[in-house]
Image (spheres, grey):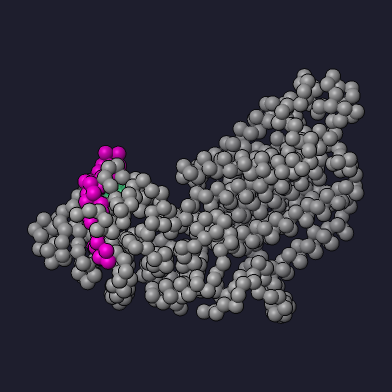
Amino acid sequence: MTNSSPQRLLTPKEIGSYAFLALILLVVLPMSMDVFRLNLVGKYLSYTFVAMSLVLCWGYGGILSLGQGIFFGLGGYCMAMFLKLEASSPENTAIQSTPGIPDFMDWNQLTALPWFWEPFNNLGLTLLAVVLVPGLFAFVIALAMFKRRVGGVYFAIITQAVAAILTILIVGSQGMTGGINGITDLRTLLGWDIRTDDAKFILYFVCVFFLFASLLLCQFILKSKLGRLLVAVRDTEERVRFSGYNVDNFKIFVFTFAAMLSAIGGAMFTLQVGFMSPSFVGIVPSIEMVIFCAVGGRLSLFGAVYGVLLVNFAKTTLSEAMPEVWLFALGALFIAVVSIFPDGLAGLYKTYLEPTVDKIFGPLYKKFKQILPSRGSAVKSN
Amino acid sequence: MSDKDFVLAVEGLTVSFDGFKAVNDFSFYVEENEIRVIIGPNGAGKTTVLDLICGKTKSTEGSIKFCGKELTKMSEHGIVHAGVGRKFQNPSVYEDLTVFENLELSYPKGRNVFGALTFKRSQEVLDAIQETAEMVFLVEMLDKSAALLSHGQKQWLEIGMLLIQNPSLLMLDEPVAGMSVAERKKTAELLRKITKDRSVIVIEHDMNFVADIADRVTVMHQGKLLSEGSMNHVQNDPKVVEVYLGH
Ligand SMILES: Nc1ncnc2c1ncn2[C@@H]1O[C@H](COP(=O)(O)OP(=O)(O)OP(=O)(O)O)[C@@H](O)[C@H]1O
Ligand SMILES: [Mg+2]
């Protein structure tokens, strides 16, 4: 396809990719797994939001964030706060010295709900907070850093520092955050018990729905001129700047968007796993996310999704068998990705498998292309 | 004479890097539709002058007036929007994108976040890209990755990326460096074509090329103005011969 031909949001080939992923996530896995395993996959899927966010901001924009756990965690905490308040109704907490507040507050001698917990009595406000709190936080970090032209390694280190500081803050203010244990013992969502097998089954599909919505949204961004600008900024930032773009604003946008996306993953994590703790905020999970993304292929949204799934399946299998080996295996995997196959699984797929797949499905794509109306006006091709 | 008569009026421009004055009390004026060439030995401060004009480096002292607007206090993108385009010394194009996409991104539309998200490849955009590609001899390469271009073609592409923005002042830092003789000839032709309705500042070491295109020549040495005038005048200036042309 030439550059100047009209752009489609989805080419037949991409529709094929979506269909394949949908087949796996909506048919194969739910039919072949019990709810316990499926819930585990759901947990992994919540990480794919972070991996996708890294494809945008790191793979395309060249902004390495070693602190995506911050936003995953904040999104997760916002959701957890709502669920915790619902679980802490005066009836449920009658034995506490102050009934009606979360148990860990009572244990820490708090006698009233802190002000910033108040909005989380309302589901609508909570859902807004899930994306807006991490979004705003990311916006402030990005504004402060990118307007000062802090970038590259320095930016990565700062995101890492923020992740560390946030973890310390959460752990340190036990009475207000649940401390090191996090927010646990979550029960119902508007009266619907999320701990049951049925709920877990449904939440898995909700997660898959958001995953596809996010994939489409990311793809829309990457296919717009903004996507190409991100690549241009990664290549030669100066040239973009001196072509009349306010580069800082584009970086702020993509970093903030990535944060919001990660936060949705965090909220889905809380809903499916039933708790949120500082161990998903800090440096280690943040770096793990980068590894997931790198293994999948940092230039491929689908690659990121498969990367998360495969690494986590490996993690579960391996750490059940030999827990002490896992971290070394992860490290080795990362080194292999960086030095041997920098485009990750997506790159390997492209070189070795895609030609065969294209041969098989090529005629089908062609047929599809004729049926699909193209976006935009008919344009002469060069 | 008021500043308004000049497209660009640089006065008393000084920049100091930790005490080292790379540009020192430098003044020069560029008229409408003029091709001005700046020459001078390595390290004379030529590139730094362009950096100062386009806002990449902030001046310590002095003023830069472009069509009556003071540039020293403007943002980089503001200066571009005002109509100043600048080519870098090392060709800088987006190597991971195609020639078409390089030109498309340079088209002056949809330059904020929302605009970029909703940007459409309208006929107008396609025409501008086609026209520019023809001008810089790259029509055949439109769908090729910019990384595959030769050094000279990258220089042309970058010039094209500036042309598509239609700046009223175009600044080119060593545009024919690394080009073959034939390519230099084509570039000289190109420059003459594109200066019909704009002013151009060119930094160049190749004296034949300079003689070929320059309306007037400014010679810099150690951050200062050494000589200025027609090619003929400058070539016969003993000061210039001593520090630069004599070598
Ligand atoms: N940001 C900077 N910090 C410190 N010194 C600098 C900076 N930019 C330029 N210089 C110095 O200023 C002097 C002028 O450099 P400049 O690049 O303008 O020279 P030039 O005339 O373009 O030379 P050339 O012909 O080699 O391109 C050099 O000595 C350079 O080392
Ligand atoms: Mg120079």
Left or right, A296 with respect to B103, comes to right
* Residue at 31%, 74% in the rendered image: B193
Front one among A322 and B30? B30
Residue A197, image x and y in percent? Answer: 90, 47
* Residue at 59%, 36% in the rendered image: A162
Per the image, is A218 magenta? no
Number of disc labels = 0
Left or right, A296 with respect to A122, comes to left
Q: Is residue A199 above or below residue A173?
A: below
Front one among A292 and B87? B87
Per the image, is B16 magenta? yes
Residue B189, image x and y in percent? Answer: 29, 75
Report the magenta stretch's main SS: strand
- Whether residue A227 is visible: no
Front one among A172 and B213? B213
Q: Quadrant of residue B197?
A: bottom left
Q: In this view, does B228 lie above or below A95?
A: below
| Magenta-tinted stretch | B9-37
Q: Is residue B230 above or below residue A36?
A: below
* Residue at 89%, 29% in the rendered image: A92
Residue A125, image x and y in percent? Answer: 74, 40
Q: In which quarter of the image is residue B89?
A: bottom left
Left or right, B172 with respect to B92, comes to left
Front one among B9 and A185? B9
* Residue at 73%, 26% in the rendered image: A114
- Whether residue A65 is visible: yes
Q: Quadrant of the N terminus of chain A?
A: bottom right
Residue A243, image x and y in percent? Answer: 43, 59
